[in-house]
Image (cartoon, grey):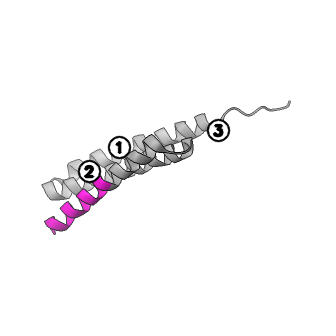
Amino acid sequence: MDLIFKILMYGTIFIIGVMLLRVFRGPSVFDRLNGMFVIGLDVIVVLLLVGYTDGREAMYIDIAVSYGVLGFITSVIVAKFMGGKEKHDD
């Protein structure tokens, strides 16, 4: 089982590398943002896999949840920023 987790971890790290190419060479801003959000989710997966292979799941789950909350807050802030300001006619 430990070998499977290590293979999954290295595969996820490879996907992070592919997404870094998307972030740096993305044709549009939205492709780059999508790449950043996928990297954030993949980092959470890598943290969980490292925790299971290390034997200290509880500590890594806490770190992954904290990282996930920060990623959610970041995505809300970026969405608000990208949405722009709407003009209201009063």
Residue range corresponding to the magenta coloring = 1-14
**For the residue marked with disc 1, what is the amino acid?**
Tyr
Give the x, y percent position of residue 79: 57, 40
Give the x, y percent position of residue 43: 32, 49
What residue is shown with label 1?
A: 67
**For the residue marked with disc 2, what is the amino acid?**
Leu
Residue 56 painted magenta: no
Residue farthest to the bottom?
A: 1
43 versus 5 height, above or below: above
Dominant SS of magenta comes to helix
Q: How far apart are marks 1 and 3 (CA)?
A: 24 Å
10 versus 62 height, above or below: below
What residue is shown with label 2?
A: 47
Mark before the other along the chain sequence, 2 or 3: 2
Q: How far apart are marks 2 and 1 (CA)?
A: 10 Å
Q: Residue at x 42, y 43 (%)?
A: 71
Residue 54, by quadrant, is bottom left
Q: Rate crowding at label 3 as few (under 14), some (14 to 19) or many (20 or more) other CA atoms within 10 Å.
A: few
Give the x, y percent position of residue 77: 53, 36
